[in-house]
Image: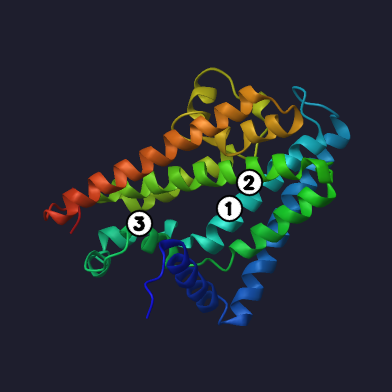
Amino acid sequence: MARLSLPALYARTARAAIAGSAADRANLTLQVFGMLINNGFMLTLWVLFFAGFHSVGGWRLRDMALLTGLIYAIAGVAGVAFGGYRDMAATILNGEIDALLTQPRPVLARLLSRDSLPIAWGDLGTGLAILIAFAGLTWRDLPALAFGWTCGLIVYLSAAVTFASLAFWVGGARSLARDLTDFMILMSTYPGSIYSGASRAIAYTLLPAGFVVLTPVAFLRRPSLESAAMEAAAVIVYAALAAGVFHFGLTRYRRGASPLGAG
């Protein structure tokens, strides 16, 4: 039997995780429709808001639609195809990672592909619907949209993996990683004009909402080499940081070190 390449192996593992998450059709349907209703409600609030205030710091309804559509689509694909990121810290803390250490393929890829979140289909469906119906995009915007979405997804996953990797050092990292990821998503649902000073610094460093959605939105509205280069640089930095922190922690874990506070 031919040895599968890493992308092919990942695709096979991810497909199995997706099939497993969809096995309970009733649960899948409830979670998807629940998320569709939740996201639809949030969009309705923004529609009502901009009906009264046509512009906020230069942001209009279609700009907010582009931003919310992007973050929902990013979170949706991340949850469907890379769902292991969501509880990766718990996997490390519970010792479930031990079984992966005996396998030849990269541990991080196996961690990301081991789960698929049913609720993420609701995010993905909502995101696509918003981008198509409200964001004011045309066919000519598809290359820029693909670029911005791909970069945003990589930054989002890289930041989430970095947060989860704290489990190699911190016993309470499961809740901490989830909270930081949720805060990053929350910051990605507000117009960039509200951020200034310390909040802007946080949005472009610790909780990189700026590179998940704000810079891609700016690139889509006013394409420029500068914004494209900035986003590409962010992808390299955050991906390298995630890989470095994870593998440094994994090396420590292999040597028998336990997270502080872990039982």
Question: What amino acid is labelled 2 in the image?
Answer: Ile
Task: Kindly identify which numbered label has been placed on residue 75.
Answer: 1
Residue 100 position, x and y percent, is: 27, 67
What is the secondary structure assignment of the residue under circle 1? Answer: helix
For label 2, count other residues whose C-alpha is less than 10 Å away and answer few (under 14), some (14-19) or many (20+). Answer: many
The one nearer the camera, 48 or 177, is 177
Residue 235 position, x and y percent, is: 49, 37
Question: What amino acid is labelled 1 in the image?
Answer: Ala
Residue visible at 18% across and 59% down?
A: 263
The one nearer the camera, 189 or 229, is 229
Residue at numbered disc 3? 108
The furthest residue to the top: 197
Q: CA distance from mark 1 to mark 3?
A: 19 Å
Q: CA distance from mark 1 to mark 2?
A: 6 Å
> In this rendering, is residue 207 above or below 154?
above
Residue visible at 26% across and 68% down?
A: 103
Residue 107 position, x and y percent, is: 31, 60
Q: Are marks 1 and 2 in contact (CB under 8 Å)?
A: yes
The furthest residue to the front: 2
Task: Kindly identify which numbered label has been placed on residue 71.
Answer: 2
The coloring applied to the image is rainbow
Q: Are marks 2 and 3 in contact (CB under 8 Å)?
A: no
> In this rendering, is residue 132 above or below 213?
below
